Image: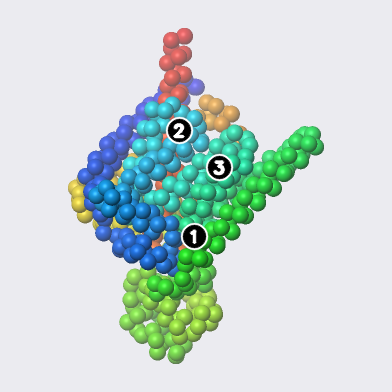
Amino acid sequence: MQRAVRHISAILGRVIFIDFSIQIVFGMTWMCLNFSKLPQFGESLFYVEISKNFICDEYTGILYPVFLLLARGIEGLAGLPYYCVMYVVQLLVACYAAHRLLMGLKKTKRALNLWGSLAVLTLPMAMQCHLAVLPYSLVSSFFLLELSISLETVRKGMLRVRQMVKLASFWLLCALLLPEYLLLGAIPPVLVLLWGLVRIFGLVRRGNCQETRRQDIWRFARQFVIFLAFGATIIGMNSLTQVKGYYGKNEKSLEACLVSRTAWTSLMSYYEGFPEQLREILDWGDVQASAYYADNMAMVFGPAVEEALGTEEAREFFLALSKQAWEQNRAHILHEIAWDAAAYTVSPIALQMQLTGRGYDSYSGRNYEIMRHYTPVLSRIYMDYSCWWFAAALCLGAILGVFCIFLDRSLISGRNFFSVLILGVSCLGLIFWYTMQGAGMMDYKNTIGVTCVWMVFSLLLMEKGMGAYACTEGNKTA
């Protein structure tokens, strides 16, 4: 039985290797043909403008404009377009992040690790972000580096102060790129600190000497202070560089997210019940514009409500409208939330459904149109193949995972469990956050890191399958 399982695992491992190699060829070809092009994202122009005045609102981080300023300086010195400078930086950081994540889960041969890094790098959704003037490439790479350091810590069985400083530094970089990573980027270090607590209590239960326990508690206390210090630094730097409402959006709040999540699709039906002072400012045309384009909930609807009612009363109005929408359209709202959560979890599969008319409209469709602008035929083939292969890789990886556990029960261990927990909770945090930001706003650029984590698992299981093949060959030789 075990010999048959090893043979099947070896075949599946080789299939995964071949198909990822095809994706790498497509991805590197697409990269070479598009490296000198600047995709026409509206956000790109926005960040370029911020790099000239360095005024951010609460939705925008200061770090990417700083990088753009440096890139424009290199452009002046070397004559290389600033966006090409950013592409080089983003590609190198992304490749390094994939390498570290693979090493964080399991040490592999250098050549195989490089190949795996290219496989993660050439995911079409990730590659599009790497070759765009947007913060999503760097923030996803820094987030993956957070995960890799967390996994290395668990694998080695000890959290040192230097590791916590590195972990918190990448958290800082993430949060200065996108402000929401003050919370999202805190998930890996918080989980590592919890793992440290579990480890300390485990030492206590095993009856380790009092001196060892005292050292571990003191080490944990220092790491917790480092975590708090970096958190305070993030809050301070963002508060110093942000001007609320500077670019016309409503104030960021839980109530504003709830009304965008629950009331957007049926906003026009509530217009007659709006307060009179609000209808004097927000006419029917503005409501229609807000209902047709999800971003206008923050750009048109929210600011008008705050102007008419004031910030505090606006929050109360948002909450009341959210409750009304929930009571009247609960099933529809839950259906939309489930679709968005699923789309953020497995973005390539959701995108393929949308492109074939089986899904729903989202920002991802616009991303795909921008991707096809310069190389339409290659982009279509590249995206179609990679989306199909993503689904196939998950299925093959799941089968390989069952086979690997069957062949090696030691894979079910406390450290492996906590490693999977760190990855799972961190990815679920991203999925939940962006799902609840609003209806009609699903954008695969937000969860590039989640898509990369899925592929890393498939790559590691592929290596296990190839290892099973090596064992089979060894048995034959013997």
Which amino acid type is shown beneath numbered disc 1? Glu
Residue lying at the far front of the rendered structure? 77
Tell me whether the residue at label 2 lies in contact with that at label 1, contact meaning CB atoms closer than 8 angstroms. Answer: no
Q: Residue furthest top?
A: 478
Measure the alpha-carbon separation of dots 2 and 1.
32 Å
- Residue 221, percent across and down? 69, 48
Above or below, 316 relative to 144: below
Q: Amino acid at mark 2?
A: Leu
Mark sitting earlier along the chain (2/3) = 3
Foreground residue among 385 and 206 = 206
16, 379: nearer the viewer: 379
Label 1 Cα crowd, 10 Å radius (few <14 / some 14-19 / many 20+) = some
Location of residue 20 with respect to 307 vertically, above or below: above
Q: Is residue 253 left or right of residue 227?
A: left
Labelled disc at residue 180: 1
Q: Secondary structure at mark 2?
A: helix
Residue at position x 31%, y 33% from top?
21
Disc 3 element: helix
Q: Tell me the residue at 49%/60% (across/down).
A: 180
**Residue bearing the label numbered 3:** 150
Which element carries disc 1, helix, strand or loop?
A: loop
